[in-house]
Image: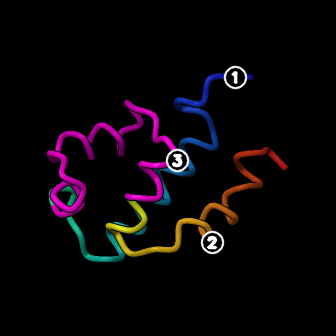
Amino acid sequence: MQKTLRSEGHKALVELIIEKRKAAGLKQEDVAKALGQRQPWIAHLESEERRIDVIEYVKLADAIGFDAIEELRKLLPVILKK
């Protein structure tokens, strides 16, 4: 299995998170605070410098206010390259 960092699927996931955060009118700092993190943690995530594990993804979705499962289903073709 290939590494996932900076893969097409990873890039699509990061783009989704950024899009949803901005659509919700949230700054990186807002999301970081909701997750008990500091803003640089979100910046590293959004610049694809770190992987996003499934627990982080679900917590990010909750903090931003989108349905993690619904959005992941939409990304599956990119992640699985179908």
Residue labelled with disc 2? 70
Residue bearing mark 3: 54
Colour pattern:
rainbow
The residue located at (46%, 53%) in the rendering is 57
Query: Where is residue 24 shown, x and y percent of the image?
Result: 32, 77
Give x and y (percent) for residue 1.
74, 22
Name the residue tied to disc 1.
2
Residue 80 versus residue 34 in the image, above or below: above
Q: What residue type is labelled 2?
A: Glu
Magenta: main secondary structure equals helix
* Above or below for 2 versus 76: above
- First-in-chain label (1 vs 3): 1
In the rendered structure, does residue 45 fall within the stretch colored magenta?
A: yes
Q: Position of residue 37 (x, y in %)?
A: 19, 47
Element carrying mark 2: helix
Q: Are marks 1 and 2 in contact (CB under 8 Å)?
A: no
> Residue 35: within the magenta?
yes
Q: How many numbered marks appear?
A: 3
The magenta segment is 30-59
Measuring 69% from the left and 64% from the top, which residue is drawn there?
A: 73
Amino acid type indicated by mark 3: Val
Quick check: 56 left or right of 25? right
Q: What element carries label 1?
A: loop
